[in-house]
Image (cartoon, rainbow, N blue to C red):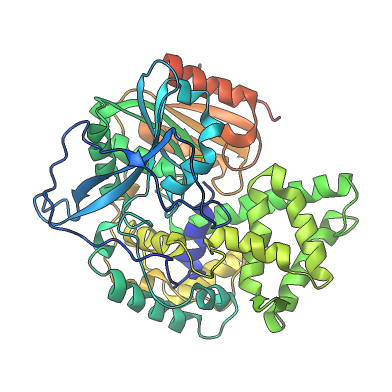
């Protein structure tokens, strides 16, 4: 749900990963593409992992299945790939299925729903809660790129960052060249309609968070007649350029860091006595890691990894204490907490392998845009980021999409859901990753949107703990009652 930041980091500054995926990527088959309604063969789930990368055993209500979809929608009778699905059956009188995309692009909906479904228990009384690994992600022909992710993470300060970006792109083409041209959001939206049919629903009921709002908006643009009850939480406007996205997100994270500092100071902060001191302490910590990474067992907490570990807790107010504790510990020589935060963000598992989160995100980001910033243009964008929020700047990075082996398309940037049922769009005033202005602009582009404003902090309003947001969303999804225009929910 929080990976929109990486769309900035990867797409613009090449803070990306080239690494093992932990399991081989699924390969296209020659199975016919036709998928009739209600034909998912649900069964017991296997091979699921938790947030710590360790295996988890889901409760009996959780089932897994798959849907075959065309690799290339221009050749619907050609090769197919299998999309991995997961379902938590409704506990009460069933309205249908509610399909989730929790964000990314590149996040596994299968693994996330196992961990998150209890947070949506009220919706699970009437809906089968369904999620999936989108094409190019983990079990759904996940993009593999060989090598080690850590190398490219370190490129935030490497003189040869552009060389690493080229090597990464070449490795992706070698390992996943057949899939790369077909992993974009437009194809994923067509997959969503196959999933709708496969679970037997006439209309798609959908809950998208972060990048999931982009996917939902594209679906509503392509299939307005099939839109059921739609919620787009922490909305992203895909029309922004790489540069605009970078500067807007830097502004959002700068504001979130200021809010964190204020909260930290109010409780007695280990990082300083003023807001400027807190920010200066963190910058000094990061800059010191450029020349001298901090040893954590047999690994290094590098500047690039520490950047991610500082940004990660800013996504939710509940995790702000982890930033203070982790940074304070690292200053004293213990980087374990910060490294753990970075690992949770990059999808690193205890055995040193990675999910496809980083590689999938890179692939989808580059295919979803015709923009191909050069190394010089990327450096200019980075300088603009530095002026807004130095902690997010990434020196010496390469131009990731400039070397990408698959062509990009701007089709996923064009949003107009005219003719669809009303769509609820939620934006948070204190959201660092998908700032509020994107909710406003996406709502306008949809033409059928109803905007709900959350006045509080954090990324993901429904999961913020706001009873107002939860009540508003549940009333719509369960009873079909939309809120009044310009509804606002207070901060918790």
In the picture provided, is 311 more to the left or to the right than 195? Answer: right
In the picture provided, is 75 more to the left or to the right than 346? Answer: left
In the picture provided, is 162 more to the left or to the right than 430? Answer: left
As drawn, 142 above or below 332: above
Horizontal and vertical percent position of residue 212: 42, 43
Horizontal and vertical percent position of residue 206: 38, 32
Q: Depth check: give the residue in front, 26 or 242.
A: 26
Residue at the location (54% across, 33% down)? Answer: 118
Residue 280 visible in this rendered orientation of the protein? no
**Image quadrant in which you'd find residue 481:** top left
Q: Which quadrant: the C terminus?
A: top right
**Image quadrant in which you'd find residue 355:** bottom left
Among all residues in the image, which is located at the extreme left?
77
As drawn, 27 above or below 170: above
Horizontal and vertical percent position of residue 253: 64, 53
Residue 191 visible in this rendered orientation of the protein? yes
Task: Give the mark count.
Answer: 0
């Amino acid at each position: 749900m929080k990976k929109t930041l990486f769309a900035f980091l990867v797409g613009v500054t090449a803070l990306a990963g080239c690494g093992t995926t932990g399991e081989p990527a699924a390969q296209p088959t020659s199975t016919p593409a036709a998928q009739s309604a209600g034909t998912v063969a649900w069964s017991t789930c296997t091979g699921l992992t938790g947030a710590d990368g360790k295996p988890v055993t889901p409760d009996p209500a959780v089932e897994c299945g798959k849907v075959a979809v065309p690799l290339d929608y221009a050749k619907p009778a050609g090769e197919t790939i299998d999309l991995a699905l997961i379902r938590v059956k409704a506990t009460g009188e069933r309205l249908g299925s509610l399909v989730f995309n929790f964000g990314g692009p590149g996040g596994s909906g299968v693994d996330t729903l196992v961990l998150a479904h209890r947070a949506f228990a009220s919706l699970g009384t009437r809906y089968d809660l369904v999620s999936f690994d989108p094409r190019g992600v983990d079990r759904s022909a996940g993009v593999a790129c060989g090598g080690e992710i850590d190398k490219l993470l370190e490129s935030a300060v490497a003189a040869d960052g552009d060389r690493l970006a080229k090597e990464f792109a070449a490795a992706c083409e070698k390992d996943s060249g057949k899939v790369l041209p077909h992993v974009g959001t437009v194809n994923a939206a067509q997959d969503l309609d196959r999933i709708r049919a496969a679970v037997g629903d006439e209309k798609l009921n959908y809950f998208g968070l972060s990048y999931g709002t982009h996917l939902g908006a594209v679906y509503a643009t392509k299939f307005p007649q099939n839109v059921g009850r739609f919620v787009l939480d922490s909305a992203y406007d895909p029309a922004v350029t790489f540069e605009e996205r970078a500067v807007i997100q830097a502004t959002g994270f700068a504001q979130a860091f200021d809010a964190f500092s204020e909260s930290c100071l109010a409780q007695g902060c280990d990082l300083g006595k003023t807001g400027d001191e807190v920010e200066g302490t963190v910058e000094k910590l990061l800059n010191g890691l450029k020349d001298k990474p901090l040893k954590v067992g047999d690994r290094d907490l590098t500047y690039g990894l520490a950047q991610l570990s500082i940004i990660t807790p800013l996504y939710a107010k509940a995790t702000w204490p982890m930033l203070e504790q982790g940074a304070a510990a690292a200053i004293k020589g213990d980087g374990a907490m910060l490294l753990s935060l970075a690992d949770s963000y990059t999808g690193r598992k205890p055995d040193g392998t990675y999910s496809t989160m980083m590689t999938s995100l890179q692939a989808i980001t580059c295919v979803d845009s015709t923009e191909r910033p050069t190394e010089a243009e990327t450096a200019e964008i980075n300088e603009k980021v530095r002026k807004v929020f130095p902690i997010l700047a990434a020196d010496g990075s390469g131009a990731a999409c400039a070397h990408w082996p698959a062509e990009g398309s701007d089709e996923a940037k064009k949003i107009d859901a005219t003719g669809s049922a009303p769509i609820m769009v939620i934006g948070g005033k204190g959201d660092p990753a998908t700032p509020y202005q994107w909710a406003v602009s996406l709502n306008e582009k949809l033409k059928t949107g109803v905007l709900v404003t959350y006045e509080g902090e954090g990324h993901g309003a429904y999961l913020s703990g706001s009873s107002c947001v939860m009540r508003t969303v549940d009333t719509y999804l369960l009873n079909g009652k939309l809120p009044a225009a310009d509804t606002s929910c207070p901060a918790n």
